[in-house]
Image (cartoon, rainbow, N blue to C red):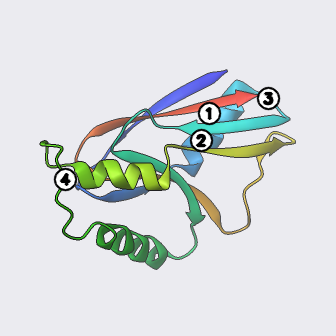
Amino acid sequence: MRRAFSIRTTGRTEIQLVTDQVKDAVREIGIAEGLCVVYTPHTTAAIAINEDADPDVLTDLTKALEKLVPDVRFKHGEGNSDAHFLSTLVGVSVTIPIENANLLLGRWQGIYFLEFDGPRTRTVSVHVVG
């Protein structure tokens, strides 16, 4: 079963916490035991799990990701090849176990949408199988 939601980003590179939206989707689907796949169908965006307790982690992560693509001379002519590279590097999905109708995230973990070519309106899909 699937639910989807939209995200509006405001910067070229941006990370947004989407844990609550994913939990809501899992609750709506109503499967108590199984797997949840969080996926974005965009080639210049990503989904990741990381710490959600300290906002400095996201600032540091953003800076580090931006530095991974220094002065590469890409052939792709749209000017967003760095975003394609970062999406490939991070990945467009994560899988999280569900137990007793809860996502089995670690104590400090959150689910994030990573934008590398914004601002845009993006889609995040939540697929649950039990």
Q: Tell me if label 1 and label 3 are in contact, CB under 8 Å.
A: no
Answer whether residue 22 is visible to the viewer in this image: yes
The residue that disc 2 covers is: 22
- Residue type (three-letter) at the residue carrying disc 4: Phe
Name the quadrant of the C terminus. top right
Residue mark closest to the camera, 2 vs 4? 4
Task: Give the image location of residue 112, x and y in percent.
Answer: 50, 54
The residue that disc 1 covers is: 25
Residue mark closest to the camera, 3 vs 4? 4
Q: Earlier in the sequence, mark 2 or mark 4?
A: 2
Answer whether residue 17 is visible to the viewer in this image: no
The residue that disc 3 covers is: 31
Label 1, label 3: how far apart the Cα atoms are: 10 Å
Q: In the picture shown, does residue 109 fall above or below 8?
A: below
Q: Earlier in the sequence, mark 2 or mark 3?
A: 2
Task: Give the image location of residue 6, x and y in percent.
Answer: 40, 34
- Residue type (three-letter) at the residue carrying disc 2: Val
Label 1, label 2: how far apart the Cα atoms are: 5 Å
Q: Earlier in the sequence, mark 1 or mark 3?
A: 1
